[in-house]
Amino acid sequence: MYVCICKGVSDHRIRRAVEEGARSWREVQQVTGCGTQCGKCACMGKGIARDAIKEE
Ligand code: FES
């Protein structure tokens, strides 16, 4: 499922960023670009990133 339309970032891509070492929403944004354009996806992206970080 696409979370971020602007940057074409899926929930899978966010989880992969965490698997690869991102440890905060800010780091996930830096790696994927999610939420860096219009910002509409930020709330959902942040939630997915936080859950993935908790599971690590
Ligand atoms: Fe993610 Fe616009 S949908 S920045």
Image (cartoon, rainbow, N blue to C red):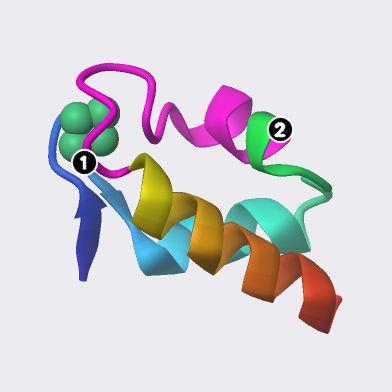
Q: Residue at x 71, y 57 (%)?
A: 18
The question of residue 44 being in magenta is answered with no
The question of residue 31 being in magenta is answered with yes
Q: Position of residue 38 (x, y in %)?
A: 20, 21
Q: Position of residue 7 (x, y in %)?
A: 24, 31
Q: How packed is label 2: few (under 14 Cα within 10 Å), some, or many (20 or more)?
A: some
Dominant SS type (magenta):
loop
Indicate which disc residue 29 carries. none
If the image is split into quadrants, where does the C terminus sit?
A: bottom right
The answer to whether residue 35 shows anywhere in this view is yes
Give the vertical position of 39 relative to 54 (above or below).
above
What is the three-letter code of the residue carrying label 2? Glu
Secondary element at tag 1: loop
* Ligand 1 rendered quadrant: top left
Give left or right: position of 55 versus 12: right
Q: Are marks 1 and 2 in contact (CB under 8 Å)?
A: no
Q: Residue at x 76, y 53 (%)?
A: 20
Q: Position of residue 3 (x, y in %)?
A: 26, 56
Identity of the residue furthest to the front in this view: 43
The answer to whether residue 7 shows anywhere in this view is no
Of pointers 1 and 2, the one earlier in the residue sequence:
1
| Residue extent of the magenta highlight | 27-41
Q: Residue at x 20, y 59 (%)?
A: 2
- Where, by quadrant of the figure, is residue 4 drawn? top left
Which of these two is toward me, 1 or 40?
Answer: 40
Give left or right: position of 7 versus 47: left
Nearest to the eye among marks 1 and 2: give it. Answer: 2
Identity of the residue furthest to the bottom in this view: 55
Which residue position holds label 2? Answer: 27
